[in-house]
Amino acid sequence: MALPAVQPKHLTTEEVIVEAHRRAVTTSPAEIAKWMQAVFGRNLTALMSGVDNPTTITRWTRGTKPHPAHLARLRTAFQIASLIEIIDDRETAQAWFMGMNPILDHHAPASVLANEPETAHRVMGAAHYFLAHG
């Protein structure tokens, strides 16, 4: 799935944050699932979304509606990944999500979202730090 191109050099930090949020709330669940699956694979997308069976992600890409709790987690991960992609690129978003992050006590952002979804705000904070400081 290709999202609309954004020229980050012309956006302020606040505009990048708002654009990532806009994408998260206006993109359909099926399109989010397709994008997340393309970027992170089905298994990692399932983990971050809180579902046990990765084939659930495939069903979402085909239009099955996620449970609201799973959709909230999917949108959160998508919003954070979009923010990273807007300021850099898809490969950086992949690496950022899977790498040990010093802001998150050296845990990978994907792991925090998967295992501690109630602390997703910490992952967003780490993304904002990355946006500001690289």
Image: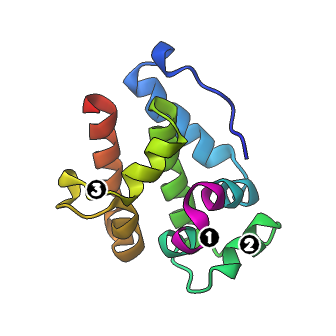
Q: Residue at point 70% right, 80% down?
A: 55
**Badges 2 and 3: C-beta atoms under 8 Å apart?**
no
| Residue type indicated by callout 2 | Thr
Q: Is residue 56 visible?
A: yes
Q: Quadrant of residue 23?
A: top right
Q: Mark 2 points at which residue?
A: 58
**On the image, numbered disc 3 is attached to which residue?**
122
x then y, percent, for residue 19: 54, 32
Q: Where is residue 100 in the image (x, y as percent from the top left)?
A: 26, 59
Q: Name the residue under label 1.
A: 42
Query: In the rendered picture of this protein, how many numbered marks are placed on residues?
Result: 3
Q: Is residue 61 magenta?
A: no
Which sits earlier in the primary sequence, circle 1 or circle 3?
A: 1
Using the numbered discs, state the Cα–Cα distance from disc 1 to disc 3 in whole angstroms: 24 Å
For the point 73% across and 47% down, which residue is it?
A: 1
Q: Distance between the residues labelled 2 and 1?
A: 8 Å
Of labels 2 and 3, earlier in sequence is 2
Check whether the beta carbons of the residues at disc 2 and disc 1 lie within 8 A of each other.
yes
